[in-house]
Structure formats: C-alpha cells, structure tokens
Amino acid sequence: MKNTTWVFGSMLAAGCMLLSVPATAQGNFSPQGMPQGMPGMQGGPGRAPAGFPQAGAPGKANPAGAKSAANAGKANTAAAKGNTAKSDKAALEAAKYQLSNHRTDLIKSTIDGYASTEDLSDKNIVGEIMEDIGKNMPIIPSVPFEKVDLKALTERAKALVDQEYGSDDATTLKVVEAEAAAEFPLYKIGDTVVVNYNMGPKHYSVKGKLYRVTENSITVEDKIINLVDLNDETRSRFDPQKNKYMRERYKETHIHLINRIKIEKINDYYEKFKGEIFKRNETAGYIYDPTTDHWGTAQEIAKNYIDRIVKDKSKSARPKPSTQVKQAEPADDGEPDDIEIADKTEPVESVSQGGGAFVQAGTVQVNDSIKMEDNAESQAKYKSVIAKAEKQQKNAYDNYSGIDTDCGYKKACWGFSIADARYALWQEPEFPHIEPALGRDVINFPPEGMDVGIAGEPAAIDLVYVSNSLSKVVLIMKDCSRQDFLRFKDSLTEQYGHAAEDKGVNSAAFTNIFSGKTKPQQIADADEIEAAQAAVKDAEKAFNSAVAELKNADDDNRDELQEARDNAASELQEAIAKAESFENAVSSENLPYVYSRIKLAKDDEGQTILPYTFNWKGQNVSGTLVFYYDKARDKVTNLVFAKEYRK
C-alpha cells in the first residue's frame, strides 16, 4: 500500500507531539484573522517547516520564506527530542513543588513537636515556635510577592514568537502559495513529463512529451492514459480543477500546522516565564500549596496550622450537653480569643498557577472589517442571510437524503462567505465565543459548556473556509463515557443514517469497539480502493472468459487453455484478496485536517496508532467520525466529527 497523503506525512514528520495543543488555544490570533508572524512551510512527506529558527539559534529572527534544510530524518530526530523534552518537562513539573512542600512539612513537624507537650494557645509558646521555624526559612519574606499577570506573560510570549518567526503575514501567505504551486505544478502541452499510473493490479510508468490533454485522458508520446487511472496528486498536474483543489488543501493544511506550532511555542515561553516567577517567589521565602492553589508566608501557614490544632482540641474537650437541661453552646467562630501573634502580616493574595496561556477572556471581537452593530443596516443584512439559509436548507431537505441534507452549522450554510456565516450566527449563544483565525473561525466553548443543540459537549467547533467559502465544519468534542458517546453516535445515525462501516455484516461495528472485536481501520487513498475493486471485476471477466474457452476447447489446445484458466483463477484470487484488504479501509483524502485536531496515540515503539474512523458519504457532503477508546478508563477520547462540502 502506498503511504497516506503528503499532508498526513508532513504532519507526522513535523512532529505529532505538536498536535496535542488544546482546542481552546487555536483561536488566539489577531482580530483580523491572520496569526501574527506566521512563517512559511515547505511541503511534502517528511519536510520540516520552512522559515523556522534552527536549533542553536533561539530568538534569532528568520524571515518568512527561508527554506529549511532539515530533511525527514532530521524532522524525526526533532520529534524524538520533543518526546524527551516532554518527559523532562513532566519530571520538572513533579519536582516544582519540592521546596514548598519541604517547608510546609518542616513547619508542621515543628508545631507537632510542641503540640505533644505544650499548650499552643499560649502566645509565648507560639513565639518560640515562630523562632524555631525562622531558623530554617524566612517567617516573613523581605521582598514583595510577585504576582502572575496572565495577560502580560502571554503578550510577552507572543512578542518573542513574532521576533523569532517574523510577523509579515502577507509575505508568509505568498510563500505558502508559491510552495503549493511548486508542489502541484500544472503541465502544459509540450512539457516533458513522467506519469506513474495503475491499470488493475499492475503499475506502469511513461516518460515523454505531453501531446494532448482532454477532460478524460492525456496523451504522452503515443500512449493514451485515462485520468481515472491516476492518483489525485498525479492527476492534479493535468486537471486544472483538481490542481486548484490540491493547492488550496496544501495551503489550508500547512498554514493550520504552522499556527499550531506557533501556539505551542507561545505556550512554552509562557510556562517558562511563569516558572521563573514561581522560582523567584520561592527563593524569596513564599510557600506554595498546590492542593489549595495558594501562596502564603511561613507565618501564615504556621498560624493556620496552630489555629486548627487548638480548635480541634477545644472541640474534643467541650462537655456534651445534659440530657436533662439543654444548654446553649457558645458560637464557635473558629478563632481562639486569646491568641495573638506579633508582627502579623496581611494575607498574600492567592495567585493561580493553573491553566494555560490562553484563558478565555470574554467576548472576542470579530474581524474589524465586518461591522455587526445593532442598527438597521446590520439587522437587514442579518434577515437577508437567514432567508438565504432557510431557502438553502429547504432545498436540501426537498431534494436530498442522508448527510446531503446537512447544510453546515445551524444557519451558517455551505458556500457562505466568512461575513455571511458570522451574520448567520449573530443571534446564537455561541457567537461571542467565535475567534477568527486564518482560513477559519473557531468557536471555543467555555469550560462550563453551552447548550447548542448538539448531543454531547463540544469543546470547540471549526468553521473552515476555502476561497472564502464555508467548506468544512469540524466538531471537537470533550472526552466522554461510553454511554455519552453512543448517544452522540445515535444522534448522527438519526440525522444521516448508518455510517458506511456500520452496515450489513458490520452492523455492530460501533458496539463491538468496546469488546475489542472492531479494530481501527487501515488508511488508503481513494484511488487505491477504487482500483482494487475494479481489478476484481476485470479479473472476474478474464476468468469467466477463460472458463468458456476451455469448455469449447479441442484436444489440440486444451492444455494451453487449461493453463490460461488456472492463471486467470490465480489472478482473480489475488485481486479478491487485495480488495478484501481494503474492505474497511478509510480514504485519506479528507482526513489530514481532522487528524490535525486530535492527538495521535503512539505505541511503545513510537509508532502511530490509528484511531477508529467511520464515514458518511453523500453526493455533495461527506462526514468523518474519528476517536480513540481508552479501555482502561472506559472513555472515548479525541472525539472529532468533520463534515465537508464537496460540490
């Protein structure tokens, strides 16, 4: 089998570890929709992104469009280093709280030592405790506590990434377009070309001058080759429409991957800066409690622990109420009346150390060029877009069935421009959470979720535009239980019918996932699957013809025809075996974007483990459901459903 498409290969070579960026980080770009400082990327399997700073030169500006010298081997090495770095990061995370934990344990053990023999409500004893603790750490740090400013750290991280990768978006876009044109050239009559193609199970290669191109075939030297015998990449070199599609897909996927790499880099800087602040606060003498996410001084922590011990002893020593006369108990305010601590400091404000660089900060403005104010002009535009959407939806329901009745996302219909799609969603509850990005809008849902009429909890939804036309809707769902997943799957079945892999003999394909009977499908190119099926038909015809000739044979040629019949039978068996190997294959044609929205799992040897994939196929619309099943936790993870309009 051939490798999967060039896009999928490029993603893996660039480092699948980068695909684990949270969906909520995807949309944090400029209000104009273009990510700041987006570098170019060189295409093809195993190629590293162009224009990226090389190892050993951190912080050095690298203009967009500079070609990377890294090959597939170097990219794989970088990915391996990325895995090591991730392990190192996990070790650092585990060790981050050691100093604070050590100080906390020392404070508590010191107090416990006194509590066994002394009265902790005695302020003189408390003074001795503080003196002992002060021998090992500052009771009150001499420098002010340094707060973590999420916004300032994020802006600082973004500024560094812009400095490293450049910030000229228009130049970067031109670079990616030039690379797409170089990756998928369109040949002209008279060009010398090399064409590799399949006919049935056999492979052929022809080199020579291109003499003729029609809608159905090409002529190279004296050889006529049908376009249906070419794979998508080869066909795009002769078919203008296919060429345009492949270039657009190249740009879309590479820009999307670049965005993710930049986000990962921003997050790395953010965590580095936050860690430096954390270290400075600890060095100054402040103590962090990871269980409460709170910073405090040694004096605060000691006082709180002493108060708790005194309170517990007070409760245990309190006499039980008489059964004869019920007496009122004094109110317990949790604060001993006779404890005083000299030089009491004001509590240090709690500073969150959790979360990433991209915390939801309320409404995100849409593109400044699209004015959506509550005035007569915008209301008229909104009504016009809604009327257009309802007409398109009625036409789909009247003329199509299955997934072809799907028109996009709510009133944002296939073919809508970015402006029309946003107007269509203007009055929807998720509209304030739309975050523009290059070539798409991302709806990032708040952590508490939002009821948007989807069976399940979406974490994010991508609205993807190709040539300013809504072409894909990608639902990124939260990890869920088996029951919640089946409810989500059933909602898809109710809308679109059964998936192609969930029919006939495979009617229990979904439920058999949980028992281990259903395995992840293999990936193949659509032309491979089609060629294998066509080869069976051709071999069957040849076999039937050989059987008929043998039946009418005379003694002179019977042996020869018997051999021909046996050869035809062998070829038919081989063709059937190959076709059966593709029986549950998944076409890689529309998977790269879906795969870029999930974290691809790895086995112990570092090989990619394919997720489960189910497809709904219509005339105009296709749907792909992708997910993993974590048997140990009985959870469905990395659940994505993508719809694509292909008309």
Image (cartoon, grey):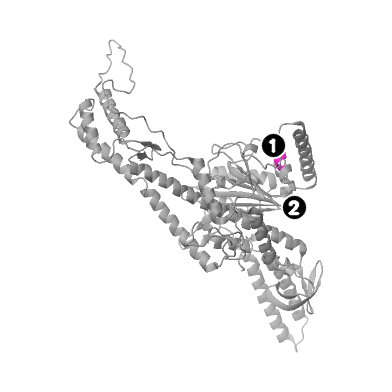
SS for tag 2? loop
Q: Nearer the viewer, residue 115 or 514?
A: 115
Q: Is residue 382 left or right of residue 67?
A: right
Name which residue lies at 80% across and 73% down. Answer: 189
The residue at which mark 1 appears reads as: 426
Q: Position of residue 513 (x, y in %)?
A: 55, 52
Name which residue lies at 69% across and 34% down. Answer: 427
Q: Can you tell which quarter of the image residue 226 is in?
A: bottom right
- Rate crowding at label 1 as few (under 14), some (14 to 19) or many (20 or more) other CA atoms within 10 Å: some
SS for tag 1? loop
Amino acid carrying label 1: it is Trp
Q: Can you tell which quarter of the image residue 581 is in?
A: bottom right
Q: Position of residue 552 (x, y in %)?
A: 78, 81
Q: Is residue 552 above or below residue 313?
A: below
For the image, the number of numbered tags is 2
The residue at which mark 2 appears reads as: 620
Mark 1 or 2, which is nearer the eye? 1
Q: Earlier in the sequence, mark 1 or mark 2?
A: 1
Report the magenta stretch's main SS. helix
Q: Nearer the viewer, residue 85 or 135?
A: 135
Residue 424 among those drawn in magenta: yes
Amino acid carrying label 2: it is Asn
Per the rendered image, the range of residues in magenta is: 421-426
Q: Can you tell which quarter of the image residue 100 is in?
A: top left
Q: Position of residue 270 (x, y in %)?
A: 48, 47
Q: Is residue 397 left or right of residue 84?
A: right
Q: Is residue 43 above or below residue 619?
A: below
Q: Nearer the viewer, residue 619 or 560?
A: 619
Is residue 23 at all visible to an observer of this figure? yes
